[in-house]
Amino acid sequence: MEEESNEFLCEVFLRLYRPGHCPFPGTVVRHMVYRGKQLRTILCGEHVGVFEGWETSPIQVYRERHELVPDDVILGVRIWPSPDITCFEESASNSETRTELNMWTAMHRAVKSHACWRYWLGHYAAYPVPVNRGPLQDSYGNWQRAKDHAEGMYRTYAREDHGQEYAELPEGFLHSIACKAAENLRSRKVSQGSVSHG
Ligand SMILES: [Zn+2]
């Protein structure tokens, strides 16, 4: 149980595709003492910058000194994938054309690389030392390539199967990719190493 942080989700409230709390695992706690009371917020790698000026500690370090309840209840909902694009694997198996299958496969791969990048983003937020920089940059590059590929596959699918030129990947797809990546991170499906090439 070296990665306990998966039990603590980011507490930032967002209004993106739909409002709710960030679904990614927290990796740091930002905290301060206000009128003798300990104030704290759990944050993922992306949101480590909020509450500027507060102290920052990796979750494990914070827990050695203060109480932190796993899977604590939060006011308000979490952001979850849109129900209409719930499962890329299932969609892939129901594909009616080759281009559709390629498109769903590209989405599924994008989820993996997004999760890997988010893992390293969180790890670097908690432990910002030079040795963690390389994997973070590599994983970001992999995610960008997977995203480009997914966008290209979507364009091809829209053109060949629906006769639409220059279709852009809908926001809902990107949202679902991110939410699926968050689920993978929480269920520890993400390997910490690089995304497999090929
Ligand atoms: Zn977050």
Image (spheres, rainbow, N blue to C red):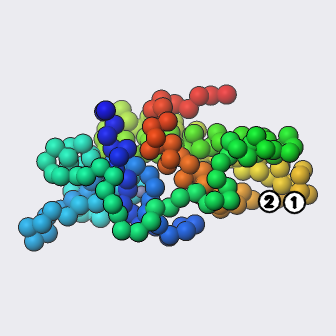
**For the image shown, how many numbered marks are present on the structure?**
2
Query: Where's the C terminus, which quadrant?
Result: top right
Residue 18, percent across and down? Answer: 55, 68
Front residue of 198 and 77: 77
In the picture, the disc for residue 153 is none
Decide if residue 146 is in sight here: no
Residue at image position (58%, 57%) is 81
Residue 194, given in percent of the width and then of the height, sits at 51, 31
The structure residue drawn at horizontal position 29% and vertical position 63%, both measured from the top left corner, is: 52
Q: Are marks 1 and 2 in contact (CB under 8 Å)?
A: yes
Q: Which residue is at the front of the view, 50 or 36?
A: 36
Q: Is residue 16 above or below residue 123?
A: below
Which x, y percent locates residue 108?
Answer: 65, 42
Residue position marked by numbered label 1 in the rendering: 164
On whether ligand 1 comes within 8 Å of the CB at mark 2, the answer is no
In the figure, residue 170 lies in which quadrant?
bottom right
Q: Quadrant of the N terminus?
A: top left
**What amino acid is at disc 2?**
Ala
Task: Give the left or right position of residue 190, taking residue 108 as reference.
Answer: left
* Percent position of residue 89, x then y: 68, 42
Describe residue 153's horizontal placement relative to residue 18 as left or right: right
Quarter of the rendered image showing ligand 1: bottom left
Check the image and report above or below for 88 versus 18: above
Residue drawn where x is 39% and y is 63% of the image:
12
Label 1: state its secondary structure: loop
- On screen, residue 20 above or below 6: below
Tell me the element at label 2.
loop
Compared across the picture, whether 151 is left or right of 97 comes to: left
Distance CA(mark 1)–CA(mark 2): 6 Å
Residue of label 2: 167
The residue nearer to you, when weighing 52 against 193, is: 193
Going by the image, does 6 lie left or right of 172?
Answer: left
